[in-house]
Amino acid sequence: MSRFKDKVIWITGGGSGIGLALAIELASKGARIIVSGRREAKLNEATYFINSKGGNCRALPCDVTRYESLKTCVDIIIEEYGRLDVAVANAGFAVNGRIERITEEDWRRQMDVNVVGLAQTTRAALPALYDSGGQIVLIASVAAFLGSEYSGAYCASKAAVRSIGLTLQLELKNTGVSCTTIHPGFVESEIAQVDNRGKHNPNAPDKRPAKLMWTAEKAAKVMARAIAKRKREYVFTGHGKLGVFLGSHFPRFTLWLMGFGKRKPRAITSE
C-alpha cells in the first residue's frame, strides 16, 4: 500500500510547476490533495485535471504573506478532512539582479514570500501536524548552498529556508512531527517567467541551461520518494548534487567555476 494512501496533503504554490507536478504525483498514490496559491484560475485548472484522472483534489486560494489567510486554509482543511498529514511549503519566486541594483522593496518582497511566507505556512500547519504525527516539507533549492550572479536575493532566501529546516529538525525532536527540506536543481517551472514584483509573464524567456533541466514530472517522483522516507534533507538532479558537493568542500574552486575569475565589472550607481 502507498505511504500516501488517504493522507491529507496541503501544497502551497500548487497551481503550477513543481507544486502542481507534486500534487499530481501524490494524488496518483491515493493522497487527498489541497492546492493553494494566489492564482485561483490555476488552482481550479489543477483541481480539474487531478480529479479528471481519478484523484482527489481541492483548491483553497491563499496568500502566503498573510498568516490569517494560511490559518484559514488549515481551519478549512481540518473542518472538511478532519486532519492534516503533510504540509508542503512550496510557494516562492525569484528576484533577479545585481546586489547593488536590487531595491529595498524587491528584497522585502523576496523574503516575504520565500522566507516569511514559508515560516508562517509552517506555523499555521504545525498544530494540526502535531495531532497527526505528520510532516512539514520545505522546498528550498541547490541555490541555498551556492552564490550565483544576478540571483543574490533568491540564493539568500533559499539559504534561509535551509536554516529554518535545520532548526525545525531540532525543535520538532520527540514531537512525532518530522521536517524534510528539499533542494532541487534546475527544474522546469514558471519561476523564470515571474518578474521581481511577482507578476507572471508567460512570454518571458527561461535563461537557465536547457540541457540540465529536469521535467517537473521527473522531479515530483523523486520528491515523493524523499517525502515518503521522511528524509531530513534531499538534494536532487545530478548537477545539483555536484554543485552542493563542490560548494561545500571546494568553495574557492566553485567561485572560480561560476565566474569568480571574470574581469571585475565597473560599479553601477544604484537608481
Image (spheres, rainbow, N blue to C red):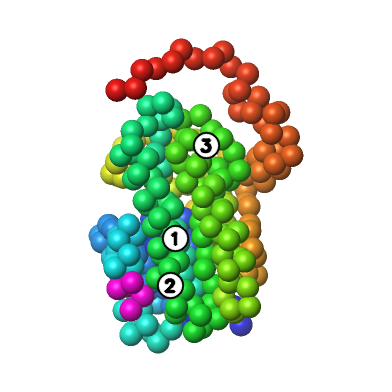
The residue that mark 1 highlights is 119
In the rendered image, is residue 251 in sight?
yes
Please identify the residue farthest to the front as the structure is shown.
171
**SS state under label 2:** helix
Mark 1 surroundings: few (<14), some (14-19) or many (≥20) residues within 10 A: many
Q: Quadrant of residue 37?
A: bottom left
Magenta-tinted stretch: 71-75
Disc 3 from disc 2: Cα separation: 36 Å
Horizontal relation, residue 87 to residue 185: left or right? left
Query: Between residues 90 and 133, which one lies in front from this camera angle?
Result: 133
Disc 1 from disc 2: Cα separation: 10 Å
In the rendered image, is residue 24 in sight?
no
**Disc 3 residue type?**
Ala
Q: Residue at x 41, y 30 (%)?
A: 97
- Among the two numbered marks 1 and 3 on one chain, the one whose residue lies closer to the N terminus: 1
Q: Residue at x 40, y 55 (%)?
A: 116
Mark 3 surroundings: few (<14), some (14-19) or many (≥20) residues within 10 A: few
Asked whether residue 73 is drawn in magenta, I would say yes
Q: Quadrant of residue 101?
A: top left
Horizontal relation, residue 80 to residue 26: left or right? left
Q: Position of residue 86 (x, y in %)?
A: 49, 73
**Disc 1 residue type?**
Ala
Mark number for residue 210?
3
Mark number for residue 125?
2
Discs 1/3, front: 1
